[in-house]
Image (tube, helix red, strand yellow):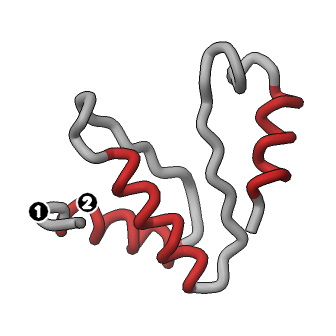
Amino acid sequence: MTVGRDRELDGLLRWLAGGSGSALVVGEYGSGKSHLLRYLYFRAMQSGYAVALVRLEPNETPLYKPKRVYRDVVLSLE
């Protein structure tokens, strides 16, 4: 369900096709960020990219523990 997200999807798909830099998705709780990223994940996979979906959690996968983040990236890589 990506209804009403044409502008965001357009920008993210252009970013995906361009292959440079980073993209940041920001929004209020419940605004559809996770759904939008899952959609981008599947589109990237369909385009032949290697993809990984990692959820950064303060207690499980915090950014200050890069080995845990790396482990989760490797384990979820498709």
Dot 2 amino acid type: Glu
Q: Residue at x 71, y 22 (%)?
A: 60
User: Residue at image x 68%, y 57%?
Assistant: 52
Q: Nearer the viewer, mark 1 or mark 2?
A: 1
Residue 11, position as x, y percentages in the image = 31, 65
Q: Is residue 58 left or right of residue 73?
A: left
Q: Are marks 1 and 2 in contact (CB under 8 Å)?
A: no
| Other residues around mark 1 within 10 Å, as few (<14) / some (14–19) / many (≥20) | few
78 relative to 4 in the view: left or right: right
Q: CA distance from mark 1 to mark 2?
A: 9 Å
Q: Position of residue 46 (x, y in %)?
A: 56, 84
Q: Residue 24's x, y, as percent?
A: 43, 43
* Rendering quarter of residue 40: bottom left
Instruction: Report the residue at 29% width, 66% height from top.
Output: 9
Residue 17 vertical position relative to residue 51 in the rendered view, above or below: below
Q: Is residue 75 left or right of residue 31?
A: right
Q: Residue at x 36, y 54 (%)?
A: 35
- In the image, 10 versus 37, the foreground residue is 37
Indicate the quadrant containing the N terminus: top left, top right, bottom left or bottom right. Answer: bottom left
Residue reaching furthest to the bottom: 47
Near mark 2 (Cα within 10 A), the count class, few <14, some 14-19 or many ≥20, is few
* Relative depth, front residue between 18 and 50: 50
Apparent side of residue 58 relative to residue 69 in the rendered image (left or right): left
Q: Which residue in the structure is indicated by mark 1?
A: 4
Identify the residue at the far left of this view.
4
Which numbered disc covers residue 40?
Answer: none
Residue 73 placed where, x, y %?
77, 48
For label 2, the SS is: helix
**Residue beneath label 2, please?**
8
